[in-house]
């Protein structure tokens, strides 16, 4: 008696299709909170497509009989690559999270001490003449800190990116002047930088040219601080203080941690 062929979907394919559907839901949820298609939402959407493709490969293995041996090999190779990626993602994001804590100067130096204290606020995307949610949290964190440290000089660092109508530094300065009018003195803008490395390099040049000894407190969102501290040390700034600004919402957090993973890998590789 001839054995009946089973056309039941293999468990691995069913799991992957389900996972792909969850990724689609996550991408839609993130888009509703962020309202733009950014790197993180795009990556999640690509993961959904990949799950559908990978699930189809497993289905082809189940229904292909002997001719599917090479597909089994492809599936195993892909599985190994996924495991390696997940391990690296877990390690890198753990490093990012551990280094994303605030470390600030307890007492600033006085103007007659010969040491100048700088608060370096890192730019982020600006929406027209308004700061994005992430950038606003950085500015608010800096404003709250500077309320108790009036002798600091604040440097707004950020050039004009694609689809931006003004430099991030100028948008930051205007927001700060409006929301923290009592801190309008001691403001410096650095409006040439296009990335984190340039933020540090160009801001350091400003501080060096002003002369004397100085301390630097970097202000950014927590996911960003590990890369900032690493690049500042490479630039020759050894004693680094940081202020961790809160992320606006869970979608922004997920999106920016995904992007930061790739940014850290690129930094390690010197890309």
Image (cartoon, helix red, strand yellow):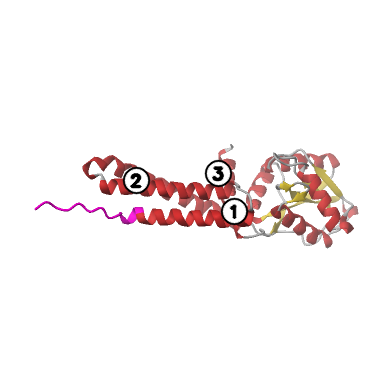
Q: Which residue is mark 2?
A: 57
Sequence-first disc among 2 and 1? 1
Say whether marks 3 and 1 touch (CB < 8 Å).
no
Taking the magenta stretch, the answer to whether it contains residue 188 is no
Residue nearer the viewer, 49 or 1: 1
- The x, y position of residue 255, in whole percent, is 59, 52
Per the image, label 1 sits on a secondary structure element best described as helix
> x, y percentage for residue 253?
61, 56
User: What's the residue at 59%, 53% (across, down)?
Assistant: 31
71 or 185, which lies in front? 71
Residue position marked by numbered label 1 in the rendering: 31
Q: Can you give x and y, in whole percent of width and height, for residue 72 in the image? A: 30, 44
Lower sequence index among marks 3 and 2? 2
Q: Is residue 57 visible?
A: yes
* Distance from the alpha carbon under mark 2 to that under mark 1: 29 Å
For disc 2, the neighbor class at 10 Å (few under 14, some 14 to 19, many from 20) is: some
**Residue 109 seen anywhere in this rendered image of the structure:** no
Q: Earlier in the sequence, mark 3 or mark 1?
A: 1
Q: Main secondary structure of the magenta part?
A: loop
For label 3, count other residues whose C-alpha is less than 10 Å away and answer few (under 14), some (14-19) or many (20+): some
Q: Residue, x 76% and y 38% (percent of image)?
A: 192
Q: Quadrant of the C terminus?
A: top right
Label of residue 133 in the image: none
Mark 3 to mark 1 CA distance (whole Å): 25 Å
Whether 4 is among the magenta residues is yes
Q: Which residue is mark 3?
A: 265
């Amino acid at each position: 008696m001839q054995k009946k062929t089973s056309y039941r979907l293999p468990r691995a394919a069913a799991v992957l299709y389900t996972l792909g559907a969850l990724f689609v839901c996550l991408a839609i949820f993130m888009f509703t909170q962020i309202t733009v298609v950014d790197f993180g939402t795009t990556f999640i959407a690509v993961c959904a497509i990949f799950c559908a493709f990978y699930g189809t490969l497993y289905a082809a293995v189940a229904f292909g009989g002997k001719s599917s041996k090479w597909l089994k090999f492809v599936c195993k190779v892909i599985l190994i690559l996924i495991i390696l990626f997940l391990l690296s993602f877990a390690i890198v994001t753990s490093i990012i999270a551990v280094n994303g804590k605030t470390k600030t100067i307890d007492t600033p130096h006085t103007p007659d001490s010969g040491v100048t204290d700088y608060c370096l606020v890192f730019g982020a995307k600006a929406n027209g003449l308004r700061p994005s949610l992430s950038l606003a949290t950085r500015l608010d964190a800096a404003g709250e800190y500077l309320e108790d440290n009036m002798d600091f000089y604040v440097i707004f660092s950020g050039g004009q990116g694609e689809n931006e109508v003004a430099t991030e530094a100028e948008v930051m300065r205007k927001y700060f002047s409006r929301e923290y009018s009592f801190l309008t003195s001691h403001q410096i803008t650095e409006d040439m930088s296009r990335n984190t490395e340039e933020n540090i390099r160009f801001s350091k040049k400003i501080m060096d040219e002003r002369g004397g000894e100085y301390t630097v407190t970097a202000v950014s969102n927590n996911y960003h601080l590990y890369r900032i501290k690493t690049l500042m040390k490479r630039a020759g700034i050894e004693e680094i203080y940081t202020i961790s600004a809160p992320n606006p919402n869970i979608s922004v957090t997920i999106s920016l941690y995904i992007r930061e993973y790739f940014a850290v890998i690129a930094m390690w590789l010197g890309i």
